[in-house]
Image: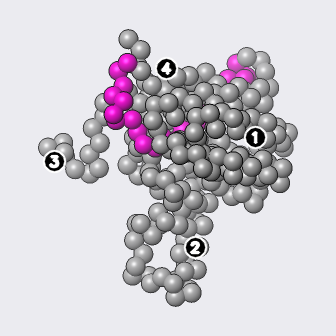
Amino acid sequence: MQYLEKIDKSRIPVHIAIIMDGNGRWAKEKGQARTFGHQAGAETVHIIAEEAANLGVKFLTLYTFSTENWNRPADEVAALMSLLIDSIEEETFMKNNISFRIIGDNSRLPQAVMERLNKCIERTSRNTGMCLTLALSYSSRWELTQAVKNIATKVKNNELSVDDIYDITIDENLATSYMPDPELLIRTGGELRLSNYLLWQCAYTELYFCDTFWPDFREEEFHKAIYNYQNRERRFGKTSEQL
């Protein structure tokens, strides 16, 4: 029996986050350049985004390029930026009623990339289905630093009292303020870490790690991750008896 048949369609996670890891190692195993792996990984994005939308996922957030990735070889970074421009398929988003957004330090992205991204954001802004977010030039430490600065500025300008700073205040000042926290985070490629991704938001997120490299990650693996999630007990600090 395939995992799709095992999934409870009434309990699909509202928000799934994915660390798309393994493009470079996948390409190396095939004797190809790392950019070949990134190209294959871009195709996987479209496959999984479409399947997530079909299942009823409301928010899909993909870790696409971290602030640390700027330290990679210049030719690889340039290829990734070029791939961003070429791989965004607005028609796929429009066909599946997907809205498109980005989070991260946009000031570091090339102008041509931002123009392409903004065009897609604008065109899909009225779509009411799943929201697909790419985390670009993103890291949780950057995001939390920006949130602290925003809150400090509000306190300085007497727009906010220190005594009125709560968890929700942090939430409202994060780049992800328009979405709920992820219920499920998937990491492909066999590594067992969060890599500076949605650290505040993933306080109670269920983590799922698999060895499959991102270019080979397909619908069945995605269904398996969701099935695994649905068979966990989410206690949020309580005991089983309290649920």
Crowd around label 3: few <14 · some 14–19 · many ≥20 (10 Å): few
Answer above or below: position of 165 versus 65: below
Q: Which residues are magenta?
A: 5-29
| Quadrant of the image occupied by residue 154 | bottom right
Does dot 4 land on a helix, a strand or a loop?
Answer: helix
Residue at image point 44% right, 84% down = 161
In the rendered image, the quadrant that contains the N terminus is top left
**Which residue is tagged 3?**
242
Q: Is residue 60 left or right of residue 45?
A: left
Q: Position of residue 65 (x, y in %)?
A: 68, 45
**Which residue is tagged 1?**
84
Crowd around label 2: few <14 · some 14–19 · many ≥20 (10 Å): some
**Which residue is tagged 4?**
220
Q: Position of residue 32 (x, y in %)?
A: 78, 21
The residue closer to the viewer here, 83 or 186, is 83
| Quadrant of the image occupied by residue 89 | top right
Give the Cα distance between marks 3 and 4: 34 Å
4 or 2: tag closer to the N-terminus: 2
Does dot 3 land on a helix, a strand or a loop?
Answer: helix
Give the Cα distance between marks 4 and 2: 42 Å
- Going by the numbered disc 2, the residue's amino acid type is Asn
